[in-house]
Image (cartoon, helix red, strand yellow):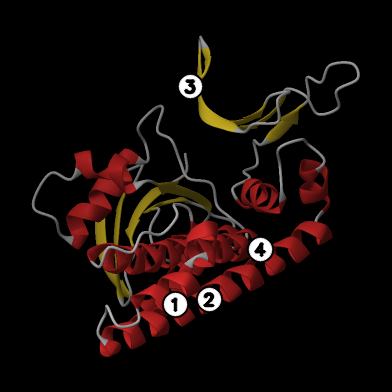
Amino acid sequence: MQKVIGLDIAKRVFQLHSVDPQTGEIERRKLSRGELLEHFARLSPATIAMEACSSSQHWARRFSAMGHEVRLIATKFVRPFVKTNKTDAADAAAIWESAQRPGMRFVPVKSEQQQGILALHNMRDLLVKSRTAQIHQIRAVFYEYGIDLPSGRHWGLKAMPTAFARAEGRIETVVLEALRSQLELIHDMSRRIERLEEQLGAYERSDDRCRRLWAIPGVGPLTATAVVAYERRSTSVEATSQPGCPGAGVVLSRGPRLLQLPPTGHVRTGRERGRGIV
């Protein structure tokens, strides 16, 4: 029986918790960042459990390369097993206990390439949200002066020059200068979003899995790269196409989640239920 080690990771100090399967002896130990890899390199193959948090994917890859089995657990599944006040030792013990629960769901270990794609997606998502917030702020200021902008990002930005012309003499100069500076920031964020999409598109064209996914109706470069980035070992592509309709009804199964592409070309995500996708 493999030894199970609960590891609470941090920036500088790491807390270990394990129980010897033969003697029942409990081991609690603190290790510095420099001692961590050296310690696990000396151990025989074991099961190392960690919370799926910042840097956990990096350590999971390093431990896997040493021959250890790695189990990453979502924080929400570890929290119920914390018996005392939240400390590093209590967290490590909770991780050790939750890793051995039957039916526990684990987070898949991602490759460096997958993490790189996810980083690009996360940067793009943040820029899109920030751009939307900046547009709404300009829209709100104009509303206060009775200047209405069309709904939607495209039409709202297209109407900006007219709105600024109408605002001359009605809004203080210092406010107009600040709004124009904010509009320049919006255009800069749009250019950065386009560059990130170009980088994702270049990766999509270089990856055979992405190219196959892109051939499905309703899937573009962003969806294809996201599916590949979240892919786990159990991922499979099941085609249920109908005659004369390539790619219809394709389901990309990823554990309990599904990405279903029905014949209409619309994308729906949800869990597997007896009544279908919800």
Labels 3 and 4: the sequence-earlier one: 4
Which residue occupies the foreground of this view, 46 or 159?
A: 159
Q: What residue type is labelled 4?
A: Gln
Task: State the mark number for residue 146.
Answer: none
Residue indicated by mark 2: 187
Do tag 3 and tag 4 residues touch (Cβ < 8 Å)? no
Q: Name, please, the residue furthest toward the left.
A: 85
Q: Residues within 10 Å of mark 3 (few under 14, many from 20)?
A: few
| Spatial separation of the CA atoms under disc 2 and disc 4 | 30 Å
Query: Circle 4 sits in a helix, a strand or a loop, which is it?
Result: helix
Instruction: Give the residue at x 26% y 56%.
Output: 27
| Spatial separation of the CA atoms under disc 3 and disc 2 | 37 Å
Residue indicated by mark 3: 278
Do tag 3 and tag 2 residues touch (Cβ < 8 Å)? no
Labels 2 and 4: the sequence-earlier one: 4
Q: Residues within 10 Å of mark 4 (few under 14, many from 20)?
A: few
Which residue occupies the foreground of this view, 5 or 78?
A: 78
Instruction: Give the residue at x 37% y 77%.
Output: 33
Do tag 2 and tag 1 residues touch (Cβ < 8 Å)? yes
Q: What residue type is labelled 3?
A: Val
Horizontal and vertical percent position of residue 68? 54, 54
Q: Which amino acid does label 1 sit on?
A: Leu
| Spatial separation of the CA atoms under disc 3 and disc 4 | 31 Å
Query: Where is 51 relative to 147, above or below?
Result: above
Labels 3 and 1: the sequence-earlier one: 1
Labels 3 and 2: the sequence-earlier one: 2
Q: Given this view, does label 3 or label 2 mark the residue nearer the observer? A: 2
Residue indicated by mark 1: 183
The answer to whether residue 114 is seen in the rendering is: yes
Residue indicated by mark 4: 113
